[in-house]
Image: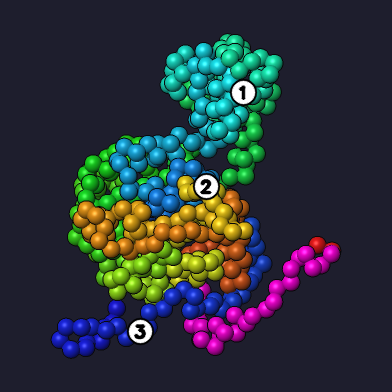
Amino acid sequence: MRRLPAGDHVKILPEISRTLSEYLLIPGLTTEDCTPDNVDLGAPLVRHRVGEEPGIRVATPMVSAIMQAVSSPTLAVALAQVGGLSFIHQNQRIEDQAADVLAVKRHKAGFRTSEITVAPQTPLGEVARQLSEAEQGVAVVTRSGDPDGEFLGIISLDDFHLERHGASETAGNRMRDRAGLVTAPASVSLSEANELIWQHHLDVLPVLDDGRVLSLVLKKDYQAHKTYHRATVDGGKRLRVGAGINSRDFKDRIPALTEAGADVLCLDSSDGYSVYQARTLEFARETYGDDVFVGAGNVVDGRAFRYLADAGAAFVKVGIGGGAICTTRAQKGIGRGQASALLDVVQARDAYAQETGVYVPLCCDGGLLNDSHMAMALAMGADFIMLGRYFARLDESPTRKLQIGSQWYKEYWGEGSRRAQNAARYGQRGTMVFEEGVDGYVPYAGSLYDNVERTRTKLISTMISCGSTNLRDFHRDAVLVPVSTESFKQTGAEVQLRQPAIDSGE
């Protein structure tokens, strides 16, 4: 990265700091191979030898931000099902974060853990209440009422009617007893489990290990498994999940998260170019070798990338101050336009791969206001993208949905806001002295499944127009052009949109 000297102390880069919205893609040749079914959005998530497969790949190059308002176990399950990955936030007690990770890892592709476990003496009214609140169709009955208790049977809403049997009747009197159930051992594969379901006309198949329920396979999940064929899973077909860590309590947090089953970790910091991140990476490498992946960041130039790559980062996050709720640039004057940062770091990554034979993936974090920005980031060389606001808007995020006027919103706040009280993340001790993030609302956008599928469709369409069928080719062949102020005006010409209600035919 070139610098122009300006006096004895200050150095000024000979460039304008540019954002992703300041570029457009020039179409490439669309060949017969460029069809939606042939386009592969798969991307490496962790470092690997050039020419070899990475330890973790994602079929959808989208991960969720390490934020309280975004990455809950519920969102992590949904995002993994559609081929992405979530990072459970670290601004909580270690044991709580580990429990969140474990909750995701209990989900095996096609297998599900029972969220409702009752004892035989549990009243049917209570069973009905729990099933309704959890939106579940079946509960497991164990002798103790605990999930790891001795399995006695199952009970669903089809097994009783409160008006007919009474709310005080017990689950033990209406459950389907274990002796009359078809069950499967822990070694059963999903295809074998589904074969049993169809062969015996079952709606649910309990999978047992030493008399205890490991998981359930539901007939209604059969089509869902076909739908989520690109799910991000580990070798045991469990959904993958990531987790955030910090450079303070990492010696305690990393072991706990690893024990819980986290597939990949990521240092959570607004500025990752620090000796503290290097020390954290060194601890992970010396303690676990190549068995634990730890991403690092955030950075905005090649120097910082090289520093973290040399320290062993599994991937590097790019972006400072570009997030929708980040005010780092306004508060501290630190940052760089996301396009400028990406182009610089991509060049450093490619040079590093050529020199060392090791490819360190890049994550674009911030500056992604719409789907076209995601396409631009991938074209510039990002391997995958991290999103906060995008996922905060959705049903699966952990925040409240509320109505303001005629519009529905979901709460959204940054990790640098007072609400997050994540003072240590921003180098402030104790009470936050100033904020580097805001606390507000984002327009509600519905289901994660629908939104991610829509975004995937747009990305695939962009790549087809550029003549690419995979991200590696997209990185190599994409041609971009800066957009002038006049071009912005032309594309932003005001049009009075027709309201559907005006046309009686709609």
Separation of disc 3 and disc 2 at Cα? 41 Å
Q: Name the amino acid type tagged 3.
A: Glu
Nearer to us: label 3 or label 1 = 1
What's the mark number on residue 101? none
Residue visible at 59% across and 52% down? 446
Q: Residues within 10 Å of mark 3 (few under 14, many from 20)?
A: few
Image height of 374 relative to 397, above or below: below
Q: CA distance from mark 3 to mark 1?
A: 65 Å
Distance in Å between CA atoms under marks 1 and 2: 25 Å
> Taking 475 as reference, is 245 above or below it?
above
Residue that badge 2 annotates = 396
- Residue 348 occupies quadrant: bottom left
Comparing 306 with 54, the one in front is 306
Q: Is residue 103 left or right of residue 401?
A: left
Q: Give the mark nearer the N terminus: 3 vs 1.
A: 3
Using the image, determine if residue 368 lies above or below residue 480: above
Residue 506 lies in quadrant: bottom right
Residue 61 in magenta? no
The answer to which of marks 1 and 2 sits earlier in the sequence is 1
Name the residue beneath numbered marker 1.
156
Outermost right residue? 505
Residue 112, image x and y in percent?
A: 52, 32
**Residue at image mark 3:** 15
* Amino acid at the residue labelled 1: Ser
